[in-house]
């Protein structure tokens, strides 16, 4: 039952008492007091198949008995080759090669290094290219490199002295446009900022541009407007900059297509998958790489200067193959699209009952965000010190529901939102249970903060 005094764990929040989970089954998690929680956010949008999938567990046991670890500096192995082949088929013909690591942050660091080495391989004036252009706000992971290229102020601040320079542009947030323009007249001013930033930094210094295809926790599910990705890709091509799309949260089927970029008809040069690729059963992330980037290495030194002990781990790669098998066989990616539509419909009445909710329920597939406002009519957000999304997450936990509190990117300030992203296997009654738990939690929150 929760954290005990004298416990030797260095917890994330030392002042909080955490329930002790003992079991997961389908969309549910169970603690050692016998309490049941619906995992309404699949952890951090990870567990797309749900918890306790016996088929995956049995397959993992067989693989662990066969080959759990491989020294990949000297060997390759079947699961790595098989997973790369599957990703080439399920992903995009434009991204035929895969490079495997063991987590999202490691993958983002790897993409930054791959882009830099791509330029080194081509030689000449390209060897001076090193800058990574990112966006405010964004989240690309928690290592120093990832914090540098990402745009999450509160996570960056304590480590600011260590962060490397990385210019940033704003998000294309049409619901709250930084330039106060409308879609019919804006001509994607937000993309012009990329070109301006490249010219300001000097194109000969810029290595890559990184963006979340769909902005996740650090913005509350913000989709790029039509043509945004095409314009970004064209600018990157014009200045010979590598275009990196981070789909760690939005990829692997979460949005109703295997790759989120497929919704927008444009592939980057490097696309990163994490979280859902092994659905929480093992630690894995993948870089899907274009012919153009691969060729530079092939025709250059032939060797990428990068490795990690657990990179391309056989158990993780085999687990991901099994996860992809089940996603395909059970048509779970289509189900994510449909379940997402249904869940958004079911959530809508809550916006009528609870005025703390914004009226805009953003989402695609099972990646959904709701906004929280102190006064939604005049779009006044809560002061950051009220930690309202965290309070709501706790109230939801008391109602037996896990949600993912996030940051809302407004034109001139940060606000609050929360993400929902249950496992793709969620049923109608389970969705109803989620909605009713949110309803009760919002009522409880209103009393607590006197809304
Ligand atoms: C878009 C995005 N990029 C990168 C990461 C970092 O991944 P990890 O936590 O596996 O290091 C996350 C994690 O939430 C993410 O959402």
Image: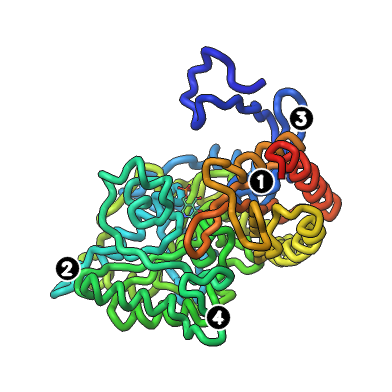
Relative horizontal placement of residue 339, taking residue 145 as reference (left or right): right
**Secondary structure type for disc 1:** loop
**Front residue (pair 153, 419):** 153
Quadrant location, the N terminus: top right
> Could you say which disc has been placed on residue 182 in the image?
4
Residue pointed to by mark 1: 403
Give the quarter of the image for residue 184.
bottom right
- Mark 3, mark 4: which one is toward the viewer? 4
Q: Position of residue 430 (x, y in %)?
A: 81, 49
Residue pointed to by mark 3: 35
Q: Position of residue 305 (x, y in %)?
A: 25, 55
Residues at marks 4 and 1, CA–CA distance in whole angstroms: 32 Å
Q: Residues within 10 Å of mark 3 (few under 14, many from 20)?
A: some
Residue pointed to by mark 2: 127
Colouring? rainbow
Q: Residues within 10 Å of mark 2 (few under 14, many from 20)?
A: some
- 3 or 4: tag closer to the N-terminus: 3
**Secondary structure type for disc 2:** helix
């Amino acid at each position: 039952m929760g954290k005990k005094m004298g416990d030797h764990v260095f917890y994330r929040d030392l002042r909080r008492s955490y329930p002790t989970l003992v079991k997961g089954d389908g969309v549910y998690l169970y603690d050692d007091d016998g309490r049941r929680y619906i995992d309404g956010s699949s952890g951090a949008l990870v567990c797309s198949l749900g918890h306790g999938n016996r088929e995956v567990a049995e397959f993992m046991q067989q693989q662990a008995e066969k080959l759990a670890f491989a020294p990949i500096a000297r060997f390759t192995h079947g699961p790595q080759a098989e997973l790369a082949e599957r990703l080439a088929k399920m992903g995009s013909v434009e991204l035929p090669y895969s490079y495997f690591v063991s987590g999202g942050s490691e993958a983002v660091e790897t993409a930054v290094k791959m882009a830099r080495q791509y330029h080194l391989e081509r030689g000449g004036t390209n060897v001076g290219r090193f800058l990574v252009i990112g966006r405010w706000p964004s989240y690309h992971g928690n290592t120093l490199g990832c914090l540098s290229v990402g745009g999450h102020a509160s996570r960056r601040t304590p480590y600011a002295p260590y962060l490397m320079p990385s210019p940033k542009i704003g998000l294309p947030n049409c619901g709250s446009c930084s330039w106060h323009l409308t879609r019919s007249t804006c001509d994607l001013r937000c993309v012009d900022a990329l070109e301006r930033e490249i010219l300001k930094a000097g194109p000969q210094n810029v290595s890559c541009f990184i963006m979340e295809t769909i902005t996740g926790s650090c913005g509350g599910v913000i989709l790029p407007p039509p043509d945004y990705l095409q314009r970004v890709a064209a600018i990157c091509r014009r200045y010979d900059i590598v275009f990196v799309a981070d789909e760690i949260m939005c990829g692997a089927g979460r949005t109703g297509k295997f790759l989120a970029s497929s919704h927008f008809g444009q592939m980057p040069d490097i696309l990163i998958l994490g979280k859902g690729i092994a659905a929480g059963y093992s630690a894995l992330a993948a870089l899907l790489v274009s012919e153009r980037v691969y060729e530079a290495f092939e025709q250059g030194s032939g060797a990428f200067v990068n490795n990690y002990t657990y990179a391309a781990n056989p158990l993780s790669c085999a687990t991901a193959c099994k996860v992809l098998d089940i996603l395909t066989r059970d048509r779970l990616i289509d189900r994510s699209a449909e379940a997402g539509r249904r869940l958004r419909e079911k959530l809508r009445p809550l916006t009528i009952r609870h005025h703390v909710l914004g009226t805009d329920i953003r989402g695609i597939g099972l990646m959904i965000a709701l906004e929280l406002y102190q006064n939604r009519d005049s779009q006044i957000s809560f002061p950051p010190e009220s930690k309202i999304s965290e309070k709501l997450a706790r109230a939801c936990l008391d109602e037996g529901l896990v949600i993912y509190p996030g940051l809302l990117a407004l034109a001139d300030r940060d606000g609050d939102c929360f993400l929902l992203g249950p496992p793709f296997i969620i049923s109608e009654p389970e969705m109803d249970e989620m909605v009713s738990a949110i309803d009760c939690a919002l009522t409880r929150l209103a009393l607590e903060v006197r809304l």
